[in-house]
Image: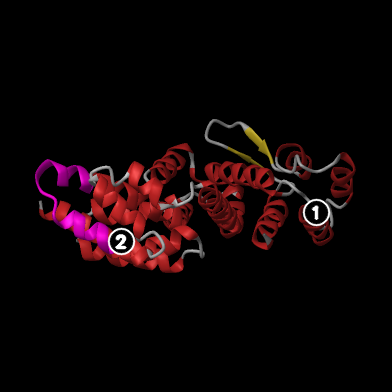
Amino acid sequence: MKLLVVAALLAVASAASFRVRRDHHEPHDYSVDTLTTKVLTWLTDDQKAALKALENDKDALLAKVEEYFKGHDKKDEAADKIIHACKHVITDAIGDEKASELKKLKESGAAVDQMEAKVTTFLDEAADSEAKTVAKHIKDSCKKVFQYKATAAASRKRRDAPAYNLDLAIDKVLTWLSAEQKAELKGLEGDKQKVLEKIGEYFKALTGDVKKEAVEKVKGACKAVFSSAVGEDKLGEVKKIKEAGGSIEDIEKKVNELVEAAADSEAKTLAVAAQPHCKKAFQWKADA
């Protein structure tokens, strides 16, 4: 959370008291007054007045914003406001066309680091301006806010994800098993490794259309588990490797790296156990 505080403080310090004009010559005011009414909307009237009184003392102003932010109980809302301000300043610096390219890159599933690299390139290429100076100064802090939001979203997804249990797997994924096979799996419910090995045994014996159906079911389940474990944003990195023609081994290596780096969770534990079996399903699909 400290990173988010730093980002908020630097955004205020860097943007205070200057004006820039965009290509269509519309003026944009980044004074403390504008920041408190457009970005720091979560402050009380008394807090805004206190900041206004410190407008000419940046160090004191920063300390006061940090004090207010630490006590704020809706940091996600505050982060959204700061992100909007970051986008606004960067767009002023690089122009609408380049900003549109950034939006498309994000929508394609690019990671925060990839977005940062592209922003850096665009800022280096942009004409000198006050907006460019401010954007380059706050870029690293803006990145931290974006990372905070991405991490928070992934954490919420993991927290809100349904519990992983055998009954759910049988009902939603292992629909191709016979009644006897399902009963046998239930008898192994206390040993996840044996359950996975038995599923692999059943899967290997399948043929024809039944196997094709099973592959799609297993692949979907694997993607869901890995997404819950590492976050949808990170899973986009795996998708890019696949689209670039990466081999099963390349994809496996990246998945292993992401899962290993992920925060501990039930999804991570299951992803680690299921990874070799998921690879077999994807390998069969690739060889089919």
* Magenta-tinted stretch: 196-215
Question: Magenta includes 72?
Answer: no
Q: Earlier in the sequence, mark 2 or mark 1?
A: 1
Residue 208 left/right relative to 247: left
Find residue 71 and name its label: 1
Tag 2 secondary structure? helix
Residue 9 in sight: yes
In the shown orientation, is residue 159 left or right of residue 257?
right
Q: Whole-percent x and y of residue 107? A: 41, 42
Mark 2 to mark 1: distance in Å?
47 Å
Which image quarter: residue 199?
bottom left
Q: Please, what is the three-letter code of the amino acid marked with disc 2?
A: Leu
Q: Return the residue nearer the eye: 181 or 282.
A: 181
Q: Decide whether the magenta segment is chiefly helix, strand or loop.
A: helix
Task: Name which residue lies at 23% across and 44% down.
Answer: 176
Give the labeled residue for mark 2: 196
Circle 1: residue type:
Gly
Determine whether 25 is above or below 16 in the image.
above
Could you tell me which residue is drawn at 82 percent across and 57 percent down? Answer: 67
Q: Is residue 255 left or right of residue 9?
A: left
Residue 197 sits inside the magenta stretch: yes
Specify the quadrant of the image occupied by residue 256.
Answer: bottom left
- Side (left or right) of 22 relative to 74: left
